Amino acid sequence: MARIVVVFDFDRTLIDGDSDRWVVTQMGLTSLFNQLRSTLPWNSLMDRMMKELHSQGKTADDIAECLGRMPLHPRVIAVIKSIHALGCDLRIISDANQFFIEKILDHHGLLGCFSQISTNPSFVDDEGRLRIFPYHDLNTPPHGCHLCPPNLCKGLVIAQIRASTTENEKTRFIYLGDGNGDFCPSLKLGEGDHVMPRKEYPLWNRLSSNATLVKAEVHDWGNGEELAKILLHLINTISTEENIKSSLSNQLDSSECKTSTHELTSIREVRGEPFRQRRALQAKESH
Ligand SMILES: [Mg+2]
Ligand SMILES: [Zn+2]
């Protein structure tokens, strides 16, 4: 039986907005942020913003409270809970940071639905300042992916998830994202996988103009309601395909196999057998 792994990008995908920008604007850091934007990589800039908040006497609890006010679409909350209950393996790969993501998910009762969150690590130091670090240690050799920023290659994380699959268990991926950083992981998906880019955002544009490079099926969405509807539909479809596959292999394994040619044809069609083989079966059936 296949494992369905649903991987969410966080900002502008799982949540409608951007958690970093939310904290910057809500906590009065916009002008300092704009002033330093061109001088620091994003990751270091957010660490610098947290230093600023600390120097103003703002605590990690104040930041958590601000994150708790970040809106999340009710249909997205509901679909995450349902697909987790259905047994899907839910993960997040994000260029935000651990503290922001965990506080937002926890506020909406979703933290327990995710088996893994791969993002820039963060912790509150002895002085109470929130520190944010890159996901990939920048002192080790670079990850070598020219599509991704030095601090995080999301495609590498996808490769690691795939490598963790046991021999008898096929992984079917559904990847949801919006940004340029989601292009690399989308290219790591194979046939039978699905990618859900947010309509008219950078990932959607890049997938549209590089269609021949993409092996996964593409399904676009514009808002939380569409995201929820498409995601549920895909999970139903994959589950049906996989049930048919496993019942077929059980029947073929059984010495009492009495599958009629007609049933076999329809099962093979769902499995996506080559057209040539389907024609051969149909020809056999008509005699
Ligand atoms: Mg994003
Ligand atoms: Zn990459």
Image: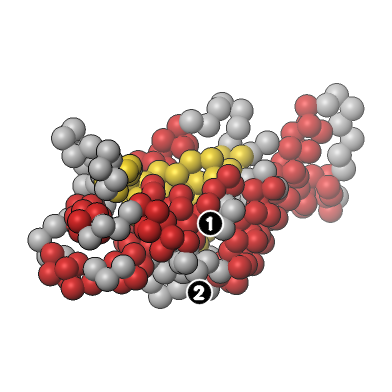
Image spot of residue 33 (x, y percent): 19, 67
The kind of residue on which mark 2 rests is: Gly
Provide the residue designation for mark 2.
222
Tag 2: Cα neighbours inside 10 Å, few (<14), some, or many (≥20)? few
Kindly report the distance in space between the C-alpha atoms of the residues bearing marks 1 and 2.
24 Å
Q: Look at the image and tell me whether residue 39 can be seen.
A: yes
Q: Position of residue 37 (x, y in %)?
A: 16, 65
Q: Which residue is mark 1?
A: 107
93 left or right, relative to 133: right
- Identify which residue, 275 or 237, lies in the foreground: 237
Which circle marks residue 166 in the picture?
none
Q: Is residue 71 left or right of residue 257?
A: left
Judge whether 63 appears above or below 25 on screen. above
Find residue 250 and report its horizontal and vertical position in percent. 78, 32
Give, as a three-letter code, the residue at label 1.
Answer: His
- Residue extending farthest to the top is 255
Q: Earlier in the sequence, mark 1 or mark 2?
A: 1
Q: Is residue 65 left or right of residue 135?
A: right
